[in-house]
């Protein structure tokens, strides 16, 4: 049951049609907990992108030898392995980036989006398709996190990427953890609205 | 039945493969990581003392590492210090819990090897006899300038919100805090993770021993002026102004991080414990050194 989408369509699919945060509503913990600044969103996005691509390719490569009854433990093992490897490589060769990202990377083991992508896509598709799907999902996640971070950082702290742009703090409420839910909900509604408008325009 | 074996076999192979990948990555990266940690530690130590690339430490500044051990002596517990001597050799001095001098054994180890925990333990066991259990407790770095004591660097570890926080603390001869640096932590990003920020860790700077002894956490917003002083680098304040603000707030408690009172309290209590215990132990060690005429380079 190979996918009939082209590589580009797979990437766009991950960013728009099946955006992990706004469409699939997966990995809500990091989306709510960590998306307080644009930079946090970007860092976690990069880390997820790496792990997603590596895990997807691994599972797609070994899909025929993974026993269907024990696929979930195998997925978890694969993800944990890649997270650990990336953690060690970054700590050794990019200590500066690791100092900023290290704390996020370890969190990725438990992300729903990665396991779900392995289960829904990588275990049925070719390595090539899984690679591009992984890229799409990673970018989609990064986009979602950065969009949330943008809104929350701007409204909560009045800054963007650490630079003071507003000069005051409009609503401190937005930086607090529970505001993440409001933010995700509002942005989801916003994106749905855009989609409705777009479809209506297309029909007319 | 056949399924059981296939499942066991395939999962085992998967685990072995994963282990192989992680093991290889570990072997390939461990040396570089250790080196990074060491370089980072050195940099942190110097920056806590106020030195940087622009303002390097003078030649006369030297660091002497003192390792503290717990030694089982029959039923009771005693404390052992591995001390560098003036002639470059090492002595292991044991002191009982009341502060009385017990024994002094020369340890056959070189300064380079003393850095390695394994080598150090071996040499100490060889010096005092294998029948006494020895456990490493902590280390202190005595910083001297031209032979006179200038400051103490205390690497420490205390419980945080979820796991341990590793920190490095610098105190001067009177045990006033010179600076605090968080080396490793796993607090929540954005909440407890803020303990690494200047506006939190710089609050400890300049607090004298009397204040530290009864240091507490208050859940109040940071005063505007104090915040500016704590983030002096960002705000470009002059050194005099920073000292003035530090002086003004030197007796205040620690202002807790928003949404992370537990982390704030953990760090505060950790620092408090480190300074208090160190001041107490150093007094005992100094008295023993003095009574026994042990010639140390600090």
Image (tube, coloured by chain):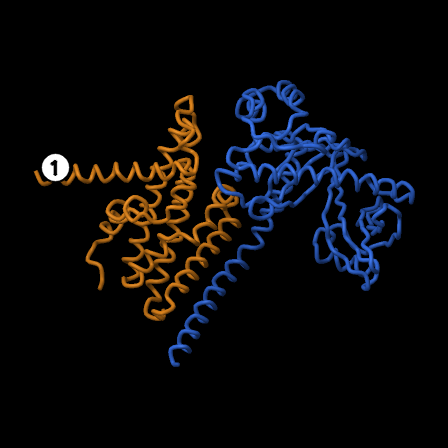
Image location of residue A137, percent across then percent down? 31, 50
Q: Is residue A56 left or right of residue B189?
A: left
| Placement of B50 over or under B290, stated as above or below | above
Q: Is residue B293 left or right of residue B253?
A: right
Chain that is orange in the image: A
Q: Residue at x 40, y 53 (%)?
A: A51
Image location of residue B44, percent across then percent down? 63, 38
Tag 1: Cα neighbours inside 10 Å, few (<14), some, or many (≥20)? few
- The residue at the far left in this view is A204
Seen from the viewer's position, the closer of residues B95 and B218 is B218
Q: Chain of mark 1?
A: A
Q: Is residue A48 left or right of residue B122?
A: left
Q: Tell me where residue A149 sits by quadrant.
A: top left
Q: Quadrant of the C terminus of chain A?
A: top left
- The residue at the far bottom in this view is B1
| Placement of A27 over or under A172, stated as above or below | below
Q: Colour of chain B?
A: blue
Image location of residue A83, percent across then percent down? 45, 54
Q: Residue at x 45, y 58 (%)?
A: A80
Q: Residue at x 34, y 45 (%)?
A: A141
What is the number of callouts on the image? 1
Image location of residue B194, percent across then percent down? 53, 36
| Placement of A18 over or under A162, stated as above or below | below
Seen from the viewer's position, the closer of residues B224 and A54 is B224
Secondary structure under the numbered disc 1 in the rendered image: helix
Q: Quadrant of the N terminus of chain A?
A: bottom left
Q: Residue at x 67, y 25 (%)?
A: B250
Q: Which residue is mark 1?
A: A201
């Amino acid at each position: 049951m190979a996918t009939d989408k082209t590589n580009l369509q797979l990437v766009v699919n991950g960013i728009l049609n099946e955006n992990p945060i706004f469409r699939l509503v997966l990995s809500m913990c990091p989306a709510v907990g960590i998306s307080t600044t644009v930079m946090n969103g970007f860092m976690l996005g990069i880390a997820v992108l790496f792990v997603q691509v590596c895990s997807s390719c691994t599972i797609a490569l070994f899909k025929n030898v993974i026993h269907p009854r024990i696929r979930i433990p195998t997925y978890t093992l694969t993800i944990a392995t890649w997270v650990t490897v990336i953690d060690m490589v970054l700590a050794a060769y990019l200590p500066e980036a690791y100092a900023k990202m290290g704390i996020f990377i370890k969190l990725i083991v438990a992300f729903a989006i990665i396991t779900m992508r392995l289960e829904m896509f990588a275990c049925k598709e070719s390595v090539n398709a899984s690679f591009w799907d992984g890229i799409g999902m990673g970018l989609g996640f990064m986009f979602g996190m950065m969009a949330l971070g943008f809104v929350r950082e701007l409204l909560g702290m009045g800054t963007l990427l650490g630079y003071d742009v507003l000069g005051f703090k409009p609503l401190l409420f937005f930086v607090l953890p529970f505001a993440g839910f409001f933010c995700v909900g509002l942005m989801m509604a916003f994106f749905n609205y855009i989609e409705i408008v777009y479809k209506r325009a297309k029909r007319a | 039945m056949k399924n059981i074996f296939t499942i066991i076999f395939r999962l085992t192979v998967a685990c072995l493969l994963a282990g192989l990948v992680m093991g290889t990555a570990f072997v390939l990266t461990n040396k570089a990581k250790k080196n990074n940690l060491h370089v980072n530690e050195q940099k942190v130590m110097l920056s806590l003392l106020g030195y940087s690339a622009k303002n390097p430490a003078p030649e006369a500044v030297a660091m002497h590492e003192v390792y503290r051990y717990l030694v089982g002596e029959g039923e009771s517990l005693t404390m052992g210090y591995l001390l560098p001597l003036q002639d470059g050799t090492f002595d292991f001095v044991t002191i009982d819990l009341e502060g009385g001098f017990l024994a002094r054994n020369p340890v056959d180890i070189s300064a380079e090897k003393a850095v390695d925990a394994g080598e150090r333990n071996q040499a100490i066991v060889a010096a005092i006899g294998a029948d006494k259990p020895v456990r490493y407790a902590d280390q202190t770095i005595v910083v001297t300038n031209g032979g006179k004591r200038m400051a103490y660097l205390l690497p420490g570890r205390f419980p945080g919100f979820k796991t341990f926080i590793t920190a490095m603390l610098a105190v001067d001869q009177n045990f006033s805090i010179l600076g605090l640096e968080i080396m490793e932590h796993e607090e929540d990003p954005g909440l407890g993770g803020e303990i690494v920020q200047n506006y939190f860790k710089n609050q400890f700077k300049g607090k004298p021993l009397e204040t530290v002894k009864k240091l507490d956490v208050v859940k109040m917003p940071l005063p505007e002026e104090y915040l500016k002083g704590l983030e002096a680098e960002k705000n470009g304040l002059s050194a005099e102004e920073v000292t003035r603000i530090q002086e003004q707030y030197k007796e205040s408690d620690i202002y807790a991080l928003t949404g992370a009172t537990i982390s704030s309290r953990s760090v505060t209590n950790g620092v408090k414990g480190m300074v208090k215990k160190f001041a107490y132990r150093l007094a005992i060690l100094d008295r023993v050194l003095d009574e026994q005429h042990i010639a140390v380079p600090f």
